[in-house]
Amino acid sequence: MADVELHNIVKTYNKGEVKAVNDVSFSVNEGELFGLIGADGAGKTSIFRILTTLLLPDSGNASVSGFDVIKDYKNIRSSVGYMPGKFSLYQDLSVEENLNFFASVFNTSVKENYDLIKDIYVQIEPFKDRRAGKLSGGMKQKLALCCALIHRPKVLFLDEPTTGVDTVSRKEFWEMLKRLKQQGITILVSTPYMDEATLCERIALIQNGKILSIDTPDEIVKQFPENLFAVKANDMSKLLNDLRKNNEIKTCNAFGEFHHITFQNDNENSHNELIHILQKANHQNIELKHITPSIEDCFIKLMN
Amino acid sequence: MRTLKFLLQKEFKQIFRNKALLPLIFVVPIVQLLILPLAADYEVKNINISIVDHDHSTFSRNLISKITSSGYFRLADYSNSFQSAFNQIESDKSDLILEIPQGFEKNLVRENEQKLFIAVNAINGVKAGLGGAYLNQIITAYNADIRLQWFQSDKFNTAPVITVASSNWFNPFMNYRFFMVPGILVVLVTMVGAYMCALNIVKEKEAGTIEQINVTPIKKYQFILGKLIPFWIIGMFVFSVGLFVVARLVYGIVPVGSLLLLYGYLSIYLIALLGLGLLISTFAETQQQAMSVAFFFIMIFMLMSGLFTSLDGMPQWAYIIAKCSPVTYFIEVVRMVVLKGSGFSDIKNHFVIMIGFAVLLNGLAIWNYKKTS
């Protein structure tokens, strides 16, 4: 059964000038870890705000746990957890006070649902008397997650939870999400980081308010239509220029250590020819290898 | 009810933890109440006077000593040329010129009549008006003295004279502070209420916490009440401290009328005022915006509510604006109850109007709050 459903949701700002969400439809199954992947300004936060009843869509309809976001907004508010991208707990209350406050407004207590947040809370417990504003970034994140979970929500909305968080904390955070998923909580998470996409069960790639593709990360990678190659040489910036000038090369993008390329006519001949041309152009230590595309490659492919 | 209790608990915790806000709420109003009434005094003293004496006679010297001993005037210059006195005015060393003509004594004795010339620097209207009036009074008294000396034997007045005896009711010694302190107290309560309430809600907007609150089952009315009640209590507290500690102990003002009536009115007034704060907070996105808008209203309230100037003396348009401000009514009520001891029947209309303000401002605020979210 689908826990979150969107049908043709449209949201515009500035009286229709800016189309933030453009005819978006997708559904998230119960107990699923669903990722919304897209660059800044793609419309991720707008979708989240519509689903958490903070924003009214211009048209289309959506439901969360079977409740309509417009008509049954009260039911949604008491059954979902929302963690906004910006830390928005009371900075002048302590860790414990924040947690108690959010527990009590949901008519529950910390004790009642302690088992759910225990794994996360023990990490911030040593600082429970510290004001929330004085916590480090990672700690704030954990506290915000605790507060969003304290009423045992059916659906958890996490808006860019790992933006601005260090690599180790990011990894930890995803571990926590996996454990929460085991508790049967449906999780909808948005992120601008492509490497996190593979950690979700299903992802939706979104750009300029439009969904580009929805599938499991593996399936999206499989759908990449061409063979992808990685090229490397000593002078990488000259290599990029030379590759882009070459008519045989269909696409070429810089990817850290390597440049990822696809060929117009993909065969053994063209590969050898390319190496030949590059050698002629005075490139040294040329390396060309076939690779499986990443989500980022697929995203760039879909964007163009 | 349970949710509201937790909201209030949270609100008070936050207020008492805010080290910058706490003195603003509790100390600043008291300091202001101690300082402002001393400064807002209509009695003008230390008016600088330049006297141009062309006569140098006993009479002229008598007149000068009368003027300088009155306590209102300070002799800035004594000369015998008008030009030098006028230079004093031009360089702002003097506010008034009194010119005593040549032959002042001679003509007064011989011809029973003399003219004096007064020139006033009218840049500061209040000082000019009062200075001129004081000087006229002194000269009139001086004139009466001379007449008394000369016509002592005259037992019966030849011409009928009306003597007016006046007594000042409710404030027998015309103590200016009795009039100002209650009014200033009202303005202080107004500032604490309107500013704090507006800023507090906007702060939640700025910090994004209102988003988090909106995704909880907390109802709008609970959230609004959770914001209004703490500041209502603080308003009551500030007013009480002002009335019982500062006004009574420092200025010796004991309310003549019923305290119950005063507090009854205060409680409605605070609801109206907090409604204004709430209304401002629905329009403002940042604390800076809220502050600027609140400042605009407070300025109008301060200057147009009959605190410093009489309402009856205002032009018609200004009078209408003054009547649209809730502060005007509360200042009137406080003065009536504290100084005059007015009862409920005297301020019945004020009650009705204030309830109207409370309903209107809060209604608008809630309507706009719904619309924007």
Image (cartoon, coloured by chain):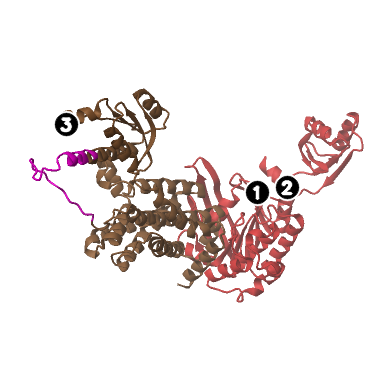
Chain colours: A red, B brown
SS of the residue at dot 2? helix
Residue A127 image offset from top left, x and y in percent = 69, 66
Could one spot residue B366 in this view of the protein?
no
Dot 1 amino acid type: Gly
Q: Nearer the viewer, residue B63 or B363?
A: B63
Residue at image x 43%, y 54%?
B191
Q: Which residue, given by chain and number where applicable, does mark 2 sit on?
A: A296
- Secondary structure under the numbered disc 1 in the rendered image: loop
What's the magenta bit mostly, secondary-structure-wise? loop
Label of residue B112 in the image? 3
Region of the chain picked out in magenta, as a range: B142-168
Tell which residue pokes out farthest to the bottom in this image.
Answer: A112
Looking at the image, residue B314 lies above or below residue B110: below
Tag 1: Cα neighbours inside 10 Å, few (<14), some, or many (≥20)? many
The residue closer to the viewer here, B75 or A44, is B75
According to the picture, the residue beneath numbered tag 1 turns out to be: A38
Can residue A276 be seen in this snapshot? yes
Q: Residue at x 82, y 34 (%)?
A: A237
The image's mark for residue B54 is none
